[in-house]
């Protein structure tokens, strides 16, 4: 056994989250490092989903909106997500996609900005959908849009800025941006901030309330394991809710949806972020998936994530020297829960295809970034060691 193999075994044996892995459906022949794109399936989901389909839908039918509490599921599931992102109950609603929630949040933020604020700032390296939606939202609200590197957004926010849209963790590099500092600076400049938590929710403690974040959005199919196309979420800080003027005021956000009145009157609270009928099957699959988080301390998740990614980086340096360069920061304060490696050859797809063929599943962001996501609830140190060893074999180091 190599030193790294025995170190991995010792670390796995000492891992306090070790038992969580058994709560997921995983094929032990495969190292799954793509949970930053699609989280693994929690074991409890299929039976719960079968019950929702067969009993709640099949037998109770329309009665389930009340008797199975379908109608209030977006807020109930939202509160469960809230615990994982540091939001007190009543501020998070689950539903729609991240793209749609970006739209709601950015337009609503512009609508509650003071007169004369007509600038939308967007993280220059943003995941594309946020940039596309922000550009459209800016056009619709008469704002101009400016792309600024995430690290410079705090300084860039000024008297004309209405809203800043920024990713908490960069999807390509795995860089963690400064949420407390950027939020404080944007708010001090009199603007609002919208954080995209797609790559941080369930990966590290976020603490939205503690840092005074205005709005946040995120998906639930990555580290929250909600399943493909699982509903996203929207956080609107409690004191902004009375001013949250949704650009998509569907009937589910009405104060009296079954009054069916012609005039729109927004509901109070997080419900105001809803639009149309909730996607009950995927919402309740997500609800069941969130059970794996019961009793889990996000600080322990973060500690393991950093240990895992540190260890993986050491293994990569040992097994594949010179073949790849980490683009994920070494500093813990600047790292999410993924490791991105730039290939020396400039080629990514072929390399990743070979890794996948050999049982190591990551993904590629073209042309030359190999991404490896470390979901601390089910990835272990032996996985990290094996992934790096196979990478070394593939690059012929
Ligand atoms: C940072 C970020 N924002 C948004 C999205 C996608 O949004 P949607 O759920 O609308 O597809 C992703 C991933 O797909 C993402 O990584
Ligand atoms: N949402 C995805 C999908 O529907 C298909 C494939 C991948 C995704 C992703 O989530 C990609 C991911 N946001 C990324 O960081 O690149």
Image (cartoon, grey):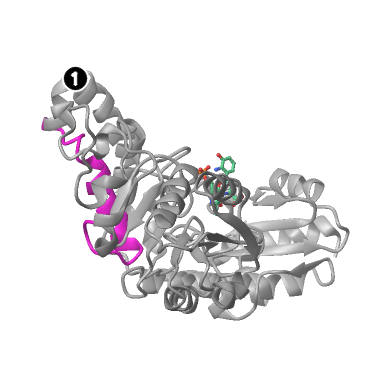
Quadrant placement of the N terminus: bottom right
Q: Is residue 84 left or right of residue 41?
A: left
In the rendered image, residue 192 lying in the magenta stretch gets the answer no
Q: Is residue 93 left or right of residue 384?
A: left
Q: Nearer the viewer, residue 109 or 358?
A: 109
Tell me which residue sits at (20%, 24%) in the image. Answer: 55
Q: Could you tell me residue 166's position as x and y percent?
A: 53, 62
Q: Nearer the viewer, residue 373 or 241?
A: 241
Quadrant placement of the C terminus: bottom right
Q: From the image, tell me which residue sits under label 1.
A: 61
Q: Could you tell me residue 325's position as x and y percent?
A: 78, 69
Q: In the image, is the residue at mark 1 within 8 Å of ligand 1 by its beta carbon?
A: no
Residue 329 visible in the displayed image: yes
User: What is the residue that sits farthest to the right in this orientation?
Assistant: 345
Question: In which quadrant of the rendered view does residue 299 lie?
Answer: bottom left
Tell me which residue sits at (13%, 23%) in the image. Answer: 63
User: From what the image shows, is residue 279 above or below residue 135?
Assistant: above
| Span colored in magenta | 67-90
User: From what the image shows, is residue 210 above or below residue 114?
Assistant: below
Q: Nearer the viewer, residue 394 or 185?
A: 185
Residue 1 visible in the displayed image: no
Question: In which quadrant of the rendered view does residue 83 lie?
Answer: bottom left
User: From what the image shows, is residue 125 above or below residue 47?
Assistant: below
Q: Is residue 169 left or right of residue 52?
A: right
Q: Secondary structure at mark 1?
A: helix
Question: In which quadrant of the rendered view does residue 275 lie?
Answer: top left
Tell me which residue sits at (47%, 73%) in the image. Answer: 186
Crowd class of label 1 (few under 14; some 14 to 19; many from 20; radius 10 Å)? some
Q: Could you tell me residue 330's position as x and y percent?
A: 64, 78
Q: Could you tell me residue 391's position as x and y percent?
A: 75, 59
């Amino acid at each position: 056994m190599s030193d790294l193999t025995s170190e991995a075994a010792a670390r796995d044996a000492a891992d306090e989250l070790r038992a969580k892995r058994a709560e997921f459906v995983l094929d032990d022949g495969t190292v799954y490092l793509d949970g930053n794109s699609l989280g693994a399936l929690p074991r409890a989901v299929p039976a719960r989903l079968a019950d929702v389909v067969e009993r709640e839908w099949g037998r109770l039918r329309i009665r389930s909106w009340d008797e199975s509490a379908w109608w209030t599921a977006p807020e109930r599931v939202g509160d469960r997500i809230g615990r994982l992102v540091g939001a007190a109950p009543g501020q998070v609603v689950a539903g729609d996609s991240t793209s749609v929630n970006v739209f709601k949040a950015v337009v609503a933020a512009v609508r509650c900005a003071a007169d004369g604020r007509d600038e939308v700032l967007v993280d220059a390296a943003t995941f594309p959908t946020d940039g596309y939606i922000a550009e459209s939202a800016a056009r619709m609200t008469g704002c101009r849009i400016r792309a600024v590197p995430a690290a410079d957004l705090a300084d860039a926010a000024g008297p004309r800025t209405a809203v800043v849209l920024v990713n908490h963790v960069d999807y390509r590099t795995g860089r963690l941006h400064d949420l407390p500092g950027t939020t404080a600076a944007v708010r001090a400049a009199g603007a609002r901030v919208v954080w995209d938590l797609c790559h941080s929710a369930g990966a590290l403690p976020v603490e939205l309330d503690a840092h005074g974040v205005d709005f946040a959005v995120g998906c639930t199919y990555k580290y929250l394991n909600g399943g493909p196309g699982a509903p996203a979420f929207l956080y609107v800080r409690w004191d902004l809710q009375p001013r949250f003027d949704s650009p998509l005021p569907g009937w589910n956000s009405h104060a009296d949806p079954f009054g069916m009145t012609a005039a729109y009157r927004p509901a109070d609270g997080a419900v105001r972020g809803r639009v149309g009928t909730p996607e009950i099957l995927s919402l309740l699959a997500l609800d069941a998936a969130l059970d794996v988080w019961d009793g889990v301390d996000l600080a322990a998740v973060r500690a393991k994530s950093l240990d895992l990614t540190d260890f993986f980086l050491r293994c990569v340096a040992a097994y594949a020297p010179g073949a790849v360069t980490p683009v994920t920061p070494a500093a813990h304060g600047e790292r999410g829960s993924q490791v991105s490696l730039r290939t020396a050859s400039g080629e990514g797809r072929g390399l990743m295809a070979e890794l996948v063929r050999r049982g190591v599943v990551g993904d590629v962001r073209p042309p030359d970034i190999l991404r490896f996501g470390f979901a601390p609830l089910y990835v272990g140190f032996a996985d990290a060691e094996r992934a790096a060893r196979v990478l070394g074999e593939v690059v012929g180091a």
